[in-house]
Image (cartoon, rainbow, N blue to C red):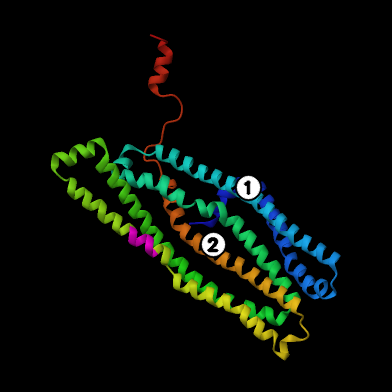
Amino acid sequence: MSLKRIAGLFTPHKATIAVVVLLISASSIIGLAQPFLVRHIIDVALPGKDLPLLAWLAAGLIAVAAATALIGVLQTWMTTGMGQKIMHTLRTRLFTHLQKQSLGFFTRTRSGEVQSRLNNDISGLQQVITSTATGVASNLTTAIATAIAMVAISPGLSLLSLIVIPPAVWFTRRVALLRRNITSTLQSELATMNTQVEEGLSVSGVRLSKTLGTTKRDAHRYTESSKRLIGLEMRSQLAGRWRMSTMGIIFSAIPALIYLAAGLPVTSGGMTIGTLVAFTALQGAIFRPVMSLLDLGVQWVTAMALFSRIFEYLDLAPEITPRRGPSRWTRRSARRGPL
């Protein structure tokens, strides 16, 4: 499946994406001011007992928080609207394409399978469509800007902070592939349950089951499907949890190592307390977007299974191609005129 085809879904929304990227960049740059304001408070305003400077710096912290919050609300409004429009396009395109299929297609295909593609699969893409593109841009911009600021403060400590990223990428890749396989199986099981509901709880289905005495058997089949669904959901949620928890522990231990390294004669180099606090804040700020990017990678690979199922139906060629122009009956009726 081509990524170009998925990107084509976002093409009609280029203007919205451009505005969102600008908002993301502005929010990332404004947010970087906070650690430097804190450093100036600790190193200059507080030791010098400069109340006017302290008031201005405190006001700056409040302004940074307010500005990033307002930008976040606007960004969420725009991305949610764009995501819902894309999902609407997918739903209507798939629905109209299935209308072109022959009666034989619906005879061969379970009704629950068709409904699952239209409802479950597209609904499962909601989080990815509404947040992935903007999430990648937001977290990537924040991570790059934060990394530049960290290097500007202390190159040595920056290397210590960034050394854990490669193993995190490797762990995340393994988790993503595992979740993709589980998601594909999970959607198939949901389709099976939809089919059982359609066949067992429709008027004709209930009448048939009561006539043949298969009510208990149908209930048992549905119960077993529900049990399998529980297992798949548990596997999906817990897939790679131990790996990601290990990375979380490593990320949490980095600040302690930074404090330890800052006390060594080789790395201290006259580093002030304010600089150390600012660097630790930046270090925490860079790990959040990095972890978010890794999590988005897992969601994206998982979503590939859903996109594959949707595009599989969109690629179905109609078995009967409608004729162009009026039919013979229409032309003959037009010559004869109204009855």
Q: Note whether residue 125 is visible.
A: yes
Q: Secondary structure at mark 2?
A: helix
Toward which corner of the image does residue 180 lie, by quadrant?
A: bottom left
Q: Is residue 213 above or below residue 269?
A: above
State the residue position of label 2.
296
Q: Note whether residue 21 is visible.
A: no
Amino acid type shown at disc 2: Leu
Could you tell me how far apart the alpha carbons at marks 1 and 2 are, in whole angstroms? 19 Å
The tag earlier along the polypeptide, 1 or 2, is 1
Q: Is residue 183 above or below residue 155?
A: above
Pick the front one: 76 or 103:
76
Residue depicted at 29% across the width and 44% down the height: 197
Amino acid type shown at disc 1: Met
Q: Which mark is residue 78?
A: 1
Give residue 214's position: percent from left, percent from top. Answer: 16, 46
Say whether residue 231 is magenta.
Answer: yes
Q: Secondary structure at mark 1?
A: helix
* Left or right relative to 233: residue 215: left
